[in-house]
Image (tube, helix red, strand yellow):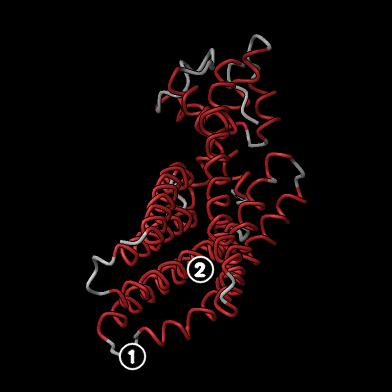
C-alpha cells in the first residue's frame, strides 16, 4: 500500500509537470502527454481522473492546473531540488 | 560563570538553534513523499541539536548530572551521524526491496539509542574518566560516518554535475574536519585545533542553512516570477 502511494506521488508530480509545460504551448494533447510520461493510455486516464478528484487540475477536458495543482507542483519542485542538493535520490 | 563558559554556552545555544531550524527543512522530504527512509534526516539534525543543547547545559554548570550530560551529548551526536549515514545508504537502494530492511535498521537504531541513554543513567561505569577514554574513539567513528556521507554526496554530484549540489559536500567536509580537529585537541590539547573545530562546525551548519534558504525561499520567489518551472 505504502509502495503504490509513494510511486503515485512521483507520477502525479511528473504528470503535473508535463501538463504545465504542455499548457504553455496552447492546447494539451493527451497522446503527447502519454509519450512524455511513458504510461499506458488507460492508466494515464485513470491518473488524470485522480488528479481531478484531488483538485489538482481544473477539469478533464482542458487539463489545466488548478491553483492547488500549481502549489503542489511548486512544492514538488522544491522538495526534489532540495533532495538533489542534499545528495539524496528519490526513486 | 567565567567568560569562557559564557562564550561556550552562547556558542552551543546558537548551534542548537541552527540545528532545530534545519530540522524544520529536513523534515520536508519526508512530509512530502511520506517515504520513511527520509525520516532519518530530521532525526539526525534533531539529535545533533539535542547534543549541542546538552553541551550548553554542561557549560552552564546548572546541571547536577554533568557527567551524564557529557555522555548524553556524545551518544546523541553519534546517533545523529549514524542516522545520516543510514539515510544516505538507503536513499540509493530501490524502495521496494529495501523497505523491510530500512524498517529493521531504523528500529534497531531507535532501540540502541534508548538503551544507550538508559545505560548512561543507570550504569555507574559511565563516569568522567570513561567519557575521556571513549570520546576520541567515538569521534573517529563519527568521522567514518561523515566520510561515508561525503563519498555518497560527492558521487551524486559526479553523476549529475551541477553547481547547486556542491555546497552540501562542502558542509559535510567542514563537519568532518571539525571532528578531526577535536581528535587533535584531545591528543595534544591544541587550542588552535579546538577553536578551529568550533568555527568549522558553525560554517558547516551555516552552509546547510544557506542551501535550505536557496531551495525554499530564493527559488520560490524565482519560480513565481518564471510562472512555475521547477527543474
**Closer to the camera, A61 or B184?**
B184
Chain bearing tag 1 is B
**Quarter where residue B11 is shown:** bottom left
Q: Are marks 2 and 1 in contact (CB under 8 Å)?
A: no
Task: Give the percent coordinates (x, y) of residue B123.
Answer: 28, 88
Task: Give the percent coordinates (x, y) of residue B92.
Answer: 63, 58
Answer with left or right where residue A51 lies relative to residue B94: left
Q: Residue at (54%, 77%) from the top-left corner?
A: B186
Local secondary structure at mark 2: helix
B69 relative to B227, above or below: below
Judging by the rendered image, the residue that carries numbered circle 1 is B125
Answer with left or right where residue B224 lies relative to residue B121: right
Q: Residue at (58%, 45%) from the top-left corner?
A: B207
A7 relative to A26, above or below: below
Neighbour tally class for label 1: few under 14, some 14-19, many 20 plus, Cα within 10 Å: few
Q: Residue at (40%, 28%) from the top-left corner?
A: A54
Chain bearing tag 2 is B
Residue extending farthest bottom = B125
Quarter of the image with the N terminus of chain B is bottom left
Q: Nearer the viewer, mark 2 or mark 1?
A: 1
Judging by the rendered image, the residue that carries numbered circle 2 is B82
**Closer to the camera, B41 or B57?**
B57
Q: Residue at (49%, 45%) from the top-left corner?
A: B29
Amino acid at each position: 500500500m505504502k509502495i503504490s502511494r509513494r510511486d503515485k506521488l512521483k507520477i502525479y508530480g511528473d504528470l503535473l509537470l508535463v501538463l504545465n509545460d504542455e499548457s504553455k504551448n496552447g492546447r494539451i494533447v493527451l497522446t503527447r502527454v502519454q509519450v512524455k510520461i511513458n504510461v499506458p493510455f488507460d492508466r494515464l486516464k485513470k491518473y488524470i481522473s485522480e488528479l481531478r478528484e484531488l483538485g489538482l487540475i481544473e477539469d478533464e477536458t482542458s487539463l489545466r492546473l488548478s491553483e492547488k495543482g500549481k502549489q503542489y507542483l511548486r512544492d514538488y519542485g522544491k522538495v526534489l531540488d532540495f533532495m538533489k542538493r542534499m545528495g539524496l535520490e528519490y526513486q | 560563570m567565567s567568560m569562557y563558559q559564557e562564550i561556550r554556552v552562547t556558542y552551543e545555544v546558537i548551534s542548537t538553534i541552527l540545528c532545530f531550524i534545519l530540522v524544520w527543512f529536513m523534515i520536508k522530504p519526508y512530509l512530502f513523499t511520506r517515504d520513511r527512509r527520509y525520516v532519518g534526516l530530521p532525526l539526525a539534525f534533531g539529535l545533533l541539536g539535542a547534543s549541542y543543547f546538552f553541551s550548553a547545559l554542561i557549560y552552564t554548570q546548572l546541571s547536577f548530572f554533568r557527567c551524564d550530560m557529557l555522555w548524553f551529548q556524545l551518544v546523541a551526536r553519534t546517533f545523529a551521524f549514524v542516522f545520516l549515514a543510514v539515510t544516505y545508504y538507503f536513499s540509493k537502494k530501490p524502495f521496494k526491496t529495501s523497505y523491510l530492511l530500512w524498517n529493521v535498521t531504523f528500529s534497531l537504531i531507535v532501540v540502541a539509542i534508548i538503551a544507550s541513554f538508559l545505560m548512561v543513567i543507570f550504569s555507574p561505569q559511565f563516569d568522567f574518566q570513561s567519557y575521556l577514554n571513549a570520546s576520541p574513539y567515538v569521534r573517529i567513528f563519527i568521522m567514518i560516518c561523515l566520510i561515508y556521507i561525503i563519498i555518497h554526496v560527492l558521487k551524486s554530484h559526479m553523476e549529475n554535475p551541477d553547481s547547486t549540489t556542491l555546497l552540501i559536500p562542502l558542509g559535510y567536509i567542514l563537519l568532518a574536519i571539525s571532528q578531526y580537529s577535536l581528535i587533535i585537541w584531545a591528543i595534544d590539547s591544541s587550542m588552535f585545533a579546538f577553536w578551529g573545530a568550533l568555527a568549522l562546525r558553525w560554517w558547516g551548519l551555516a552552509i546547510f542553512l544557506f542551501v535550505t534558504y536557496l531551495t525554499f525561499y530564493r527559488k520560490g520567489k524565482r519560480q513565481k516570477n518564471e510562472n512555475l518551472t521547477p527543474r
